[in-house]
Image (cartoon, rainbow, N blue to C red):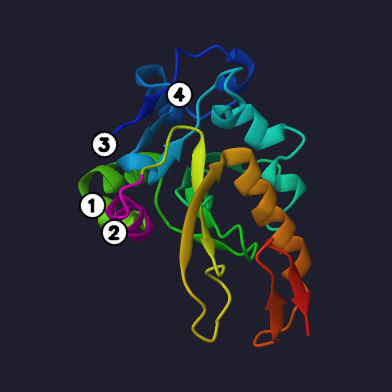
Amino acid sequence: MEDVTYIGEPVSDSVTFKQLPIEMQGFLLHANGLVAYLGGLHIRGCCQEPKWHSLAEAWSGDTAFCKIYPNVKISDIPFAQDSMGNQFLLRKGIVWFLDTETGEVENLNVSFDMFIAGVERFPGRALDLSNIGTFAKLGARLMPGELLAVFPPACIKTNGDQFKLTRMPVATRLHSLADMYRQIRRLKPGQKITVRTDESYDAI
């Protein structure tokens, strides 16, 4: 993979590692997770620290995705995320995509190995790297342990509000996305809302 900014230390969480399918174990033995494409893809590792890189934290920790998003099953493995905090899940050997703003999931119809191969061969197709590119043009870059936040949120159609990108710690960004999801999940398509700059969302 290109533009790698972080590689995890060797596997230290053997409990989680033993629960993974063989192909994922093989990948993590080679590199126990990494951040590539200048933050465009973060593959989690089996580790105790740092928490933002821990697969166990994302899978079964206090803020596990299955505890927040009804469409995520306990058995789904949240092995990776993109630059915005959307998740890639492994469900029965197949990779699914979780939109963390809306809670919607999509079957990508590829295995873990196929996903990795697709990212390495066609990163621009497999991942949305547009915001990473925009951020780089501003002379900024994501550090390991950070995600991009976009305002207004991608799922909200606006009346020409100014587009803004910023970076924030992984935990802060994921908490913000979960909070947004809880607030908008019961809205009807097309319903008007007021979006405040503190990332709160009020239905009209």
Q: Is residue 52 magenta?
A: no
Q: How far is disc 4 from disc 1 in space, using C-alphas?
A: 23 Å
Q: How far is disc 4 from disc 2 in space, using C-alphas?
A: 25 Å
Which comes sooner in the sequence, label 3 or label 4? 3
Give the number of the mark in front: 3 or 4: 3
Instruction: Report helix, strand or loop for mark 2.
Output: helix
Looking at the image, which is closer to me, 202 or 77?
Answer: 202
Residue 25 — which label?
4
Give the number of the mark in front: 2 or 3: 3
Instruction: Report helix, strand or loop for mark 3.
Output: loop
Where is mark 3, residue-wise? 3
Q: Are marks 2 and 3 in contact (CB under 8 Å)?
A: no
Where is mark 2, residue-wise? 125
Residue 121, x across and y down, in percent: 21, 47
Q: Residues within 10 Å of mark 3 (few under 14, many from 20)?
A: few
Residue 55, x across and y down, in percent: 58, 30
Which three-letter amino acid code belongs to the residue tagged 1? Phe
Residue 191 against residue 106 in the figure, above or below:
below
The residue at the far left in this view is 121
Where is mark 1, residue-wise? 122
Q: How far is disc 2 from disc 1 in space, using C-alphas?
A: 5 Å
Instruction: Write down the region rendered in magenta.
Output: 130-140
Q: Are marks 2 and 1 in contact (CB under 8 Å)?
A: yes
Residue 41 — which label?
none
Which picture quadrant has residue 192?
bottom right
Which three-letter amino acid code belongs to the residue tagged 4? Gln
Which three-letter amino acid code belongs to the residue tagged 3? Asp
Which comes sooner in the sequence, label 4 or label 1? 4
Q: How far is disc 2 from disc 3 in space, using C-alphas?
A: 16 Å
Q: How far is disc 3 from disc 4 in space, using C-alphas?
A: 23 Å
